[in-house]
Image (cartoon, helix red, strand yellow):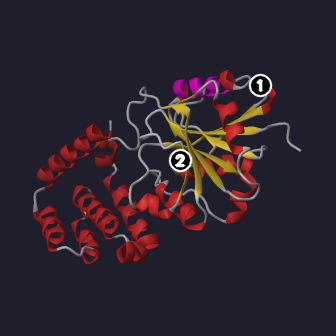
Amino acid sequence: MSQYEFSVVIATFNRPELCAAAVESVFSAAVDRHSVQVIVVDDASGSPLPRIDNPHVQLLKQDKNAGPGPARMRGIREADSPFVIILDDDDQLRTDAFATAAARLAELPAGSWLVAQFATSNAGPAHGFRALTFDDYMCERVQGDYTPVFHREQFLASGLAYPETRIGGEHLLWWALAERVAIPTWQDVLIDVGADAAERLTGIGSQVSRAREHLDLAEETWRQFGTKLKKTYPLQAARVSMGGVTYAVLAGQRLRAFAFFSNLRAPKQILIAAAVVVLPRKIVLNLFQRFRSRQRHSAK
């Protein structure tokens, strides 16, 4: 039996100072430092990680930069504890995180879950506890970010995994999980979301500069879930499709935009998509930035 109750996996890339602070926050939260393992997976950074002299910290380095998904999966596979918490390298674990997680997970029947979720400091309106279903995600009842805690053995046995996309795409995993079994989710906050990183993957600037990768993700989302979205969740289908059209234009791949048109039902949606395709990229970029800014403002 492992000496560790929890493992914390931190995928990092070119953020040595932030990563060191994230590691320190883990051990600041641990009542017994010997009960917690930290696995830092360096996603082939160009700069070395700071020296961390702690026998309970394992440092791994990827052979090539492949994005956070593969790095997190490697950390989960290498973990020695039954439960694995995912921590971003620019976030901080709260001092009561382990006590809170342990108490809540003890409420769940054995073998009834693969992944549980806890709120972060930017999560949406409080709902106490909810077992999230696929319908909850499609109807956008999930707001803000949530911290996953994996039941390591059962999750690995399920065959599910983080997507191998360089920009994250975690929604593909959460949707697949929620299709299979509801995700127990608490509003208890485990993590404070950092504001120190120069650019998060979900930032507007990153979405524009990496538009081609976001286009690839939209196409993969449609490949995995398109039939179900088109049949049962037309609004979500339109959202994915409009995103694909927009990213195609921003990426200079306009021809790839037309594959999404057949997924749009309403004439107004088709007209908007057609306008996006024919407008100059500069105008589409301006509209996209305004739209995303308005989204973020309304979410606060």
As drawn, is 295 to the left or to the right of 103? left
SS state under label 2: helix
Identify the mark nearer the N-term, 2 or 1.
Answer: 1
Question: Residue 227 falls in which quadrant of the image?
Answer: bottom left
Q: Residues within 10 Å of mark 2 (few under 14, many from 20)?
A: many
Camera sees residue 269? yes
Give the residue type that dot 2 points to.
Pro
As drawn, is 2 to the left or to the right of 66? right
Residue 279 tag number: none
Is 226 rendered above or below residue 21?
below
Give the residue type that dot 1 points to.
Arg
Magenta span contains residue 22: yes
Residue 33 tag number: 1
Give the alpha-carbon distance from disc 2 to disc 1, as whole Å: 26 Å
Camera sees residue 164? no
Residue in view at x 67 percent, y 56 percent: 114
SS state under label 1: helix
Image location (x, y in percent) of residue 200: 40, 38
